[in-house]
Image (tube, rainbow, N blue to C red):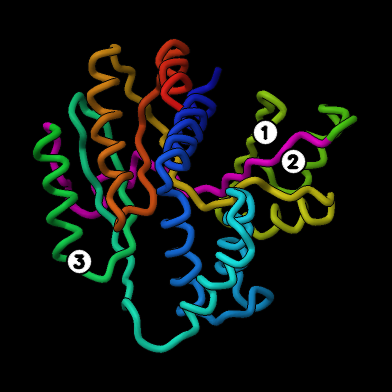
Amino acid sequence: MSGHSKWSTIKHKKAALDAKRGKIFTKLIKEITVSVREKGADPDSNPRLRLAIQNAKGANMPKDTIDRAIKKGSGEGGADYVEVTYECYAPHGVAVFVECTTDNINRTVSNIRSVFTKGGGNLGTNGSLEFIFDRKGVFVVPLPEDSVEDDLILELIDGGAGDVEIEENMIHITCEMEDFGNMQKKLEDMDIEPQSAELERIPNTYVILDDGAFGQVMKLIETLEDDDDVQKVYHNIEATDDQLANLTNQA
């Protein structure tokens, strides 16, 4: 299994835990609200909102919840959100990139710093992790029934996919950031609705940890993800199959 596949698997196992804890809807609602305030409530003219709605549907968010989030973003008053990122190191040399949406930067940076201090890590300077993470488009879509895998992969590559992996009836597609829109259009033309579609930070170098260190760092990451200001957390751990199995059991 490739490094990207293992990174992707960890991410989606953690997404399952987020959903179990009821956190994922909170983050999706905030993304919808920010998208509307940024460029309006019409998904046809607001690609970020269109993507946020697509991801909300993929997470089985009810339509009326999506509609309320759009109305909240369109209304006057309410929280004035800003987006900030933090480049950090967890114990054992693990790089961690944290994306936040907050209405109080002082609170957010204090909380992030506290998590890393208690967990044995530290905050780095902006730009310190640029050489570790690449910004790419990542799509997760269900494998169409009766599809011929080789033909499907070739068609996706023709649409801009740089990497296609099929696992457990799901397709993980990675593309360059510049090809994100083309890949979206290709999936629409193929009548395939993604379970998720995001611009993500994918590591190009990985850290392998023993079970004890893995558990320690994943606990830190889970604490980060529990913070309401934190939208996404990226890391460069390459897990073993047994470590992935333990995440599955937790979910």
Q: Which mark is residue 25?
A: none
Look at the image and say whether residue 133 sits in the magenta stretch: yes
Q: Which mark is residue 157?
A: 2
**Circle 1 is placed at which residue position?**
164
Residue 153 position within the rendered picture, expressed as x and y whole percent measured from the top left: 78, 34
| Quadrant hosting residue 43 | bottom right
The residue under the point 51% across, 76% down is 36
Up the image or down, 147 lies above or below 19; here it is above
| SS assignment at label 1 | strand
Residue 224 position within the rendered picture, expressed as x and y whole percent measured from the top left: 27, 44
The residue under the point 47% across, 42% down is 19
Look at the image and say whether residue 24 sits in the magenta stretch: no
**Quadrant of image for the N terminus:** top right
Residues at marks 2 and 1, CA–CA distance in whole angstroms = 8 Å
Dot 1 and dot 3 residues touching (CB under 8 Å)? no
Up the image or down, 116 lies above or below 205; here it is below
Dot 2 and dot 1 residues touching (CB under 8 Å)? yes
Looking at the rendering, the stretch of residues picked out in magenta corresponds to: 120-144
Please name whichever residue, 89 or 116, is drawn nearer the observer in this view of the structure: 116
**Amino acid type, callout 3:** Ile
| Quadrant hosting residue 50 | bottom right
| SS assignment at label 3 | helix
The residue under the point 69% across, 27% down is 166
**Circle 3 is placed at which residue position?**
105
Q: Is residue 122 left or right of residue 2?
A: left
For this orientation, the residue located farthest to the bottom is 76
Closer to the chain start, of discs 1 and 3, is: 3
Q: Residues within 10 Å of mark 2 (few under 14, many from 20)?
A: some
